[in-house]
Image (spheres, rainbow, N blue to C red):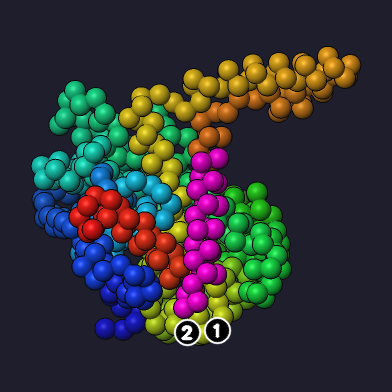
Amino acid sequence: MSDKQANFYQSVEQNFDKAAVLTSHPKGLLDQIKSCNAIYQMNFPVRIGKDFQVIEAYRVQHSHHRLPTKGGIRFSHLVNQEEVMALASLMTYKCALVDVPFGGAKGGVKISARKYTEEELEKITRRYTVELVRKNFIGPGVDVPAPDYGTGPREMAWILDTYQQLKNGEIDSAACVTGKPVNQNGIRGRTEATGRGVFYGLREMLSNEKDCKAWGMEPGIAGKTMVIQGLGNVGSYTGTISIEEGDAKVIGVSEIEGTIVNPKGIDIAKLLKYKKSKGSIIGFPGTKKLKNREDWVSIDCDILVPAALESQIHKGNAKSVKARIIAEAANGPITSSAEAILLKKGVVIVPDMYLNAGGVTVSYFEWLKNLSHVRYGRIQKRFDQNAYTNLVKLVEDMTGKTVAAKRRSFLTRGADEVDLVRSGLEETMITSYHQIFDVYKRKKKVTDLRTAAFITAIDKIANDYMSLGIFP
Ligand code: NAD
């Protein structure tokens, strides 16, 4: 097997082992944390055109130490059991790292979504949901799916509807899946959450002058050049938000149809409109197409953002990386052998289990919203607004001056749902970064951020098990 097709699951296990030996937890406990608790492989028939197709699909619950389990559903022709196991494992560590109280899970349906009509995709999604219900692999307190590669709010709405048809009257049923459309019990800010989290994570990492110096770079995200692979959900929001809120410059984009570059910067919002109308990124005004799609890896830039699939940076192309930072927006984009090469070169890898945790963080907020049956901000917004208005009035009375209308409305605004979601996400990404960085700095044998992130997650999960009294 070539390194490019290297076993993603083995790679996650190797990374776990590398960190586990640096902890003081007993072997039995570490083995329990590492192992996949439940694996459900299914094959079901779906009528496509005049024929029936047997669809292969999975749901893996990696850890039951906290319930429900949580993780996205992937639609891809590359789906296999070990890939889903790897992704489910990463979810456990990710949730622990960002203090989301769930065990990890993941689902996969082995189909290329592009090859099916919307109606066919709906049939497949609904049938998959029925299988999950039948085996008790879905439910607000059991296992809660979300979007991943190839799926989005539309699929989540089909899952919700199918679940509710089968579980009529279950009061918390809306919490059986997250990433739903806002008008279907979703939450504002979920669609952009993973990309926004990537931005918050990078911004935090680049905010400390001393750390940046040690990495040989100027502090701040402003002006940093980025190259993004995969302009889907995660890649597009990472790009637009890094440009609009961080003043970063995206100089290269790679998609299925090829890689385009413009050293002066690519307007991602405009590129997305272009892609929608033309069905491709190629030919976008001001950009040049590279001869080989795969050459996105070697573009000279500050930050490389793989946001497509796993194993994209491998032994065969790792040496050509020129970036100082690789921001793992995708899950598992770097193989173990590539990682060794990159670390030797001094490339800073910001690990997936931290950097793309924004999605599950906001999914957690959505789940809480569904359980509480009330929109964030509904109860407090006007109370805060009135209190701030009174304070401004008091200052005006005391000073004899009047605050301009625009400033007044800014100062007196009560928080809406999206404000609270963004605030919670920002807090999560900042706090978690410092937890990881503290381990990275404090533990002598820890020389990379991934190992530091694993140690942080393992310690938290071990604590959970010990407080359950399972491993005294
Ligand atoms: P998506 O389906 O919305 O987008 C993926 C994009 O990558 C697509 O546009 C696809 O055409 C492109 N792509 C695929 N193969 C490519 C290749 N070889 N070269 C260039 N482009 C290629 O998927 P997504 O939800 O954005 O997920 C992307 C990654 O982020 C996955 O690894 C996923 O597990 C991870 N992730 C997603 C979320 C989420 O909330 N959606 C959360 C955490 C992690």
In the image, residue 392 sits, relative to residue 200, either above or below, namely: above
Q: Secondary structure at mark 1?
A: helix
Please tell me which residue lies in front, 362 or 233.
362
In the image, residue 334 above or below residue 237: below
Q: Secondary structure at mark 2?
A: helix
Image quarter in which the C terminus is found: bottom left
Does the beta carbon at disc 1 come under 8 Å from ligand 1?
Answer: no
Residue at image mark 2: 341
User: Distance between the Cα atoms at labels 1 and 2?
Assistant: 6 Å
* Residue in the picture at 50% in, 80% down: 343
- On the question of residue 60 being in view, the answer is no
- Residue found 31% across the figure and 84% down from its top: 2
Which quadrant is the N terminus positioned in?
A: bottom left
Q: Which residues are magenta?
A: 423-446
Q: Is mark 2 within 8 Å of ligand 1?
A: no
**Residue occupying the point 55% across, 28% down:** 416
Mark 1 and mark 2 in contact? Answer it, CB < 8 Å: yes
* Left or right for 84, reference 266: left
381 relative to 212 in the view: left or right: left
Amino acid at dot 2: Ile
Residue 248 seen: yes
Image mark for residue 345 = 1
Q: Specify the quarter for ligand 1.
A: bottom left
The tag on residue 362 is none
In the rendered image, residue 64, in percent from the top left (x then y), is placed at 22, 51
